[in-house]
Image (spheres, rainbow, N blue to C red):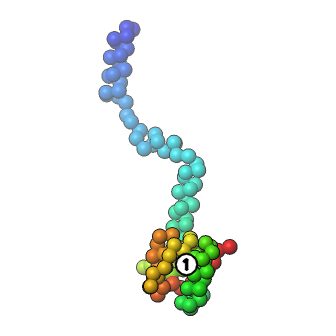
């Protein structure tokens, strides 16, 4: 078989007979670390927070001020429920700052009136 005939046969195969497997082909390239990280992220997103005891606004603000001054991590639970009656996910991070009506945790604004509890992380 000459080079020209071989080249023609190969071109004919890819133009008429070859079927790309698409996504099936690429699924094998996902690393197990990546898929396990995606599963962990999905579990965290879908986790329902346990309701903490309701704290007074003054107690919450004192913990937040102390954490802000000492660069400590806090977890803030909001008293906001989703459509299923579950509390929205807790927010954990450093206190970025305050406004007259709320606090910023990791660049997320939380109004004081929505805070249910604040816990200082160890």
Quadrant assignment for the C terminus: bottom right
Image vertical order of residue 16 relative to residue 95, above or below: above
Give the x, y percent position of residue 64.
Answer: 57, 81
| Residue appearing at x 45%, y 81% in the figure | 99
| Residue appearing at x 55%, y 51% in the figure | 34
| Residue appearing at x 42%, y 44% in the figure | 23
Give the x, y percent position of residue 84.
Answer: 45, 79
Image vertical order of residue 111 relative to residue 14, above or below: below
Quadrant assignment for the N terminus: top left
Q: Nearer the viewer, residue 23 or 13?
A: 23
| Residue appearing at x 55%, y 59% in the figure | 39
Image vertical order of residue 59 relative to residue 84, above or below: below
Give the x, y percent position of residue 31.
Answer: 56, 46
Which element type, helix, strand or loop, lies under badge 1?
Answer: strand
Image vertical order of residue 116 relative to residue 6, above or below: below
Considering every residue shown, the one lying at the far top of the view is: 2
* Residue at mark 1: 76
31 relative position to 15: left or right = right
Considering every residue shown, the one lying at the far front of the view is: 69
User: Is residue 32 in view from this perspective?
Assistant: yes
Q: Quadrant of residue 50?
A: bottom right
Give the x, y percent position of residue 86.
Answer: 50, 79
Badge 1 crowding class, 10 Å Cα cut-off, few under 14, some 14 to 19, many 20 or more, is many
């Amino acid at each position: 078989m000459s080079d020209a005939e071989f080249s023609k046969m190969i071109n004919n195969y890819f133009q008429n007979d070859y079927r790309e497997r698409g996504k099936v082909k690429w699924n094998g390239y996902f690393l197990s670390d990546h898929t396990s990280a995606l599963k962990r992220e999905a579990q965290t997103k879908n986790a329902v927070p346990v309701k903490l005891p309701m704290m007074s606004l003054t107690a919450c603000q004192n913990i937040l001020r102390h954490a802000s001054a000492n660069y400590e991590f806090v977890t803030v639970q909001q008293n906001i429920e989703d459509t299923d009656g579950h509390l929205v996910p807790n927010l954990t991070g450093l206190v970025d700052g305050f406004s007259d009506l709320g606090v910023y945790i990791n660049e997320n604004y939380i109004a004081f009136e929505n805070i249910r509890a604040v816990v200082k992380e160890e």
